[in-house]
């Protein structure tokens, strides 16, 4: 078969979210990350292209520099402390890009169904893909989301203001 299914290597992969807020009067650029990513990537060995991917992130493991913020994100924003909201998932519907050649980076556009807190929307990620010399696939891609489209609301907290309406999501995935 010309389809090779590769596993996402959690220890070499990560998801990141970035958002701007004003915390206790100070403009703050928040960066949260997690390596709790699992899933698979299907690679077509005759076209040398990534055909599809199916990725799952445990939202409860996203961490910033402030544990209290992480608790608020979990309980109040993503409500990921509820089992039905624990995982953020992404299933590709299309992957556009050139054939990969060994160890060179190529632009890639990945469109798929992103599910956050029980709401699924089609989202496009822009990025690069690379076929490493050892045969593993690396994909780095990002998108900017209006999180309100997913019904996600940032609660009114006295010490927090001017939270941007958009969040940047990035994934850095290695599969082999």
Image (cartoon, rainbow, N blue to C red):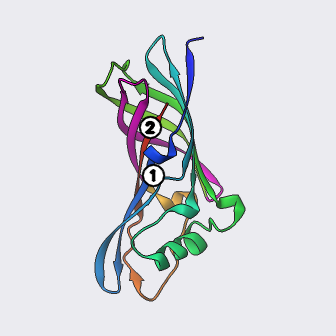
User: Label 1 crowding class (10 Å Cα cut-off): few <14, some 14-19, many 20+?
Assistant: many
Name the outermost residue toward the right.
83
Residue 75, disc: none
Residue occupying image coordinates x 57% and y 66%: 78
Q: Is residue 161 above or below residue 91?
A: below
User: Residue 161: x percent and y percent?
Assistant: 39, 80
Residue at 37% over, 20% down: 100
Q: Give the number of the disc on residue 174.
A: 2
Q: Please state if 96 lies on the left or on the right of 6 as rendered.
A: left
Q: Is residue 91 visible?
A: no
Give residue 158's quadrant in the image: bottom left
Badge 2: how crowded within 10 Å, few (<14), some, or many (20+)?
A: many
The magenta-colored residue range is: 117-144
Secondary structure under tag 1 reads strand
Q: Residue at x 44, y 37 (%)?
A: 174
Above/below status of 13 relative to 87: above
Which residue matches tag 1? Answer: 15
Q: Does 76 sit left or right of 123 as displayed?
A: right
The residues tagged by marks 2 and 1 sit, at their Cα atoms, a distance apart of 12 Å
Residue 28 versus residue 3: which sits nearer the camera? Answer: 3
Q: Is residue 122 magenta?
A: yes
């Amino acid at each position: 078969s010309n389809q090779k299914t590769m596993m996402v290597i959690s220890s070499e992969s990560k998801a990141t979210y970035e958002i701007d807020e004003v915390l206790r009067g100070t403009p703050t650029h928040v960066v949260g990350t997690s390596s709790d990513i699992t899933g698979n990537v299907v690679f077509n060995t005759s076209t040398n292209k990534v055909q599809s991917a199916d990725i799952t992130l445990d939202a409860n493991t996203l961490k910033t520099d402030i544990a209290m913020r992480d608790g608020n994100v979990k309980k109040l924003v993503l409500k990921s402390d509820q089992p039905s909201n624990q995982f953020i998932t992404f299933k590709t519907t299309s992957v556009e890009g050139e054939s990969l050649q060994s160890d060179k980076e190529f632009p890639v556009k990945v469109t798929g169904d992103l599910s956050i807190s029980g709401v699924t929307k089609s989202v496009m990620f822009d990025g690069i893909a690379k076929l490493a010399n050892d045969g593993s696939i690396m994909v780095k891609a990002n998108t900017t989301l209006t999180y309100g489209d997913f019904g996600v609301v940032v609660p009114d907290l006295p010490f927090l203001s001017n939270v941007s309406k958009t969040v940047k999501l990035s994934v850095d995935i290695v599969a082999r």
